[in-house]
Amino acid sequence: MSLYEQIGGDAAVNAAVDIFYRKVLKDARINRFFTGVDMDRQAAKQKSFLTMAFGGPNNYSGLDMRRGHAHLVAQGLNDSHFDAVVENLGATLKELGVADALIAQVAAIAETTRNDVLGK
Amino acid sequence: MPRITYEGIGYACDPGQTVLDCLTAQGIAVPSSCRTGVCQSCLMRALGGSVPEVAQAGLKPTLVAQGYFKACSCVPAEDLRVALPDAAGLKLAASVVSIEPLNPDIVAVRLRPERPLDYRAGQFIRLYRDAQQSRCYSLASVPHLEEDILEIHVRQIPGGKVSSWVHGQLRAGDAVEIADSAGQCFYVPGDPEQPLLLLGTGSGLAPLYGILRDALSQGHRGPVRLYHGSASPAGLYRTEQLQVIAATHPHFQYVPCISAGAVPSGMRQGNVLEAALADQPDMTSWRVFLCGHPDMVQEARLQVFLAGAASADIHADPFIPSGAPIAHQP
Ligand SMILES: Cc1cc2nc3c(=O)[nH]c(=O)nc-3n(C[C@H](O)[C@H](O)[C@H](O)COP(=O)(O)OP(=O)(O)OC[C@H]3O[C@@H](n4cnc5c(N)ncnc54)[C@H](O)[C@@H]3O)c2cc1C
Ligand code: HEM
Ligand code: FES
């Protein structure tokens, strides 16, 4: 069974979206990157993000990640913000009762995107 | 680069460009208003090729089945053959039954459509001043309570093309054209115990007045709270009717909020959103309806979400003003 299936697939993503997005918006370290973005559109993007981080089906290339976050890098997005997002992701999964071993695998997937997201 | 064929002529659509922008840049007059996918002023029909899903988001299944899509939200992925809708298919005639002031800035317009409209309280119709100019107005009427009468509340915007026409020229007995109902901000039965928060400013009361009476008449049993905000008491309206509903429905609470100047007894001082969140700091499990000024709606949506409301339970109707006129007549 894939990681995505073990976490619970699309249903898990749907359960995680609100919890994760609320954490991010309340996190003073990173919420400035998310203000002014339309909430409906943002929710769809959070779904894409979570599906990708859970190892689910997605069509994003490294180049897409680079382009998608370039405007944030220009606003100062750096490693500390990346770590904060991964931390919120882990806390969300913990709240949903996902096993630590699976959370570690999710963090490892997120890690593979670090250089692209940060434009390094 | 996808090509868009309109009346037999093909136009190249730049990457990322919408069908609306592509055609209007060629001088084709496609009506539009909000340009953000809300108002459905820019509907076109795809006669060939398929449009991305977002271009049909929020359309009725009957419209989707006929290939209607929102030109302002359609960035085509493939070649399309499109047409402006046969006006007769979307519009219907209505007569003005009455126009009655609700407060110094807002009138209630009651309309009788030529055939009954299939709608939900809280949805909106478009009212046409002429073929090119239409605006969205939310329905304060409830289908099973006000049988074939539609009621809208129109606030006068200084210099506003359609609202000034409604306030200055439209009279009882006049014939007008409207377009079918649309919008996702309405009550659905199924969870009669869920607490409901209805929050609006100005003419944002119109859809809430419909949603409130719809929910109560369908037997909603959970707490229902309506917060209506205005700068001064003169900006409130339907206060007596709302007080009567509150007196006869103990689970309904009406909270008028005044944000500036003296506050009469029985009303709250301050901003509607702050008042609602002070009373309900934990919005977990609430269903929320937000209507009125776009900035207020956007802020309220964020704050009630942070206070715990699930995003699927937040229904919002921002009264987005129409964009700058961009259609050049050929
Ligand atoms: C889904 C939806 C539902 C709506 N429901 C209602 C409703 O129930 N009742 C209602 O009165 N309106 C409602 N509106 C707003 C309405 O559609 C028009 O935008 C409004 O009546 C102004 O149109 P107009 O032709 O008079 O002004 P326009 O000629 O379009 O605008 C004239 C000028 O006024 C500005 N302007 C427009 N609106 C405002 C505003 N609110 N405050 C300050 N400046 C403004 C414009 O930017 C422009 O510069 C709704 C809008 C949407 C999208
Ligand atoms: C952990 C690795 C990350 C992954 C896998 C990831 C993935 C994604 C994806 C898939 C999208 C949607 C793109 C689209 O469909 O348009 C997105 C958008 C976004 N991401 Fe990330 N992201 C990551 C880290 C971050 C970080 C660290 C931040 C900021 C603190 C961030 C902020 C945003 C914002 C604001 C958007 C929306 C951009 C817009 O307005 O279009 N992301 N991300
Ligand atoms: S939906 Fe396209 S202009 Fe409003």
Image (spheres, coloured by chain):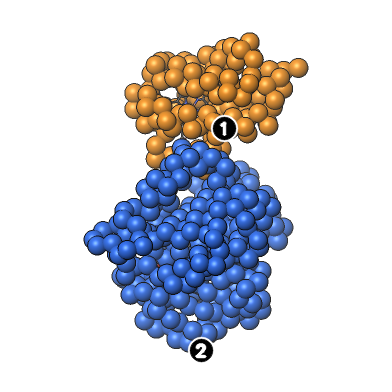
Chain colours: A orange, B blue
Mark 1 vs ligand 2: CB below 8 Å: no
Q: Is residue B220 shown left or right of residue B276?
A: right
Q: Nearer the viewer, mark 1 or mark 2?
A: 1
**Callout 2: SS:** loop
Q: Is residue B119 shown left or right of residue A28?
A: right
Q: What is the x, y in percent for residue B172? A: 48, 87
Q: What is the x, y in percent for residue A118? A: 43, 19
Asked if residue B166 is positioned above or below residue A93 in the image, the reply reads: below
- Whether residue B14 is visible here, answered yes or no, is no
Q: Mark 2 sits on what residue?
A: B173
Asked if residue A70 is positioned above or below residue B238 in the image, the reply reads: above
Q: What is the x, y in percent for residue B167? A: 38, 78
Residue type, label 1: Val
Asked if residue B95 is positioned above or below residue B12 in the image, the reply reads: below
Foreground: B57 or B240? B240
Chain for mark 2? B
**Callout 1: SS:** helix
Residue farthest bottom in this picture: B173
Residue A17's disc is 1
Residue farthest right in this picture: A1
What residue is shown at x 39% (from left), y 37% (from top)? A35
What residue is shown at x 63% (from left), y 81% (from top)? B114
Q: CA distance from mark 1 to mark 2?
A: 51 Å
Question: Are callouts 1 and 2 both on one chain?
Answer: no
Q: What is the x, y in percent for residue A109? A: 58, 15
What residue is shown at x 67% (from left), y 56% (from top)? B189
Quadrant showing the N terminus of chain B:
top right
Foreground: B109 or B147? B147
Mark 2 vs ligand 1: CB below 8 Å: no
Residue type, label 2: Gly
Asked if residue A1 is positioned above or below residue B41 in the image, the reply reads: above
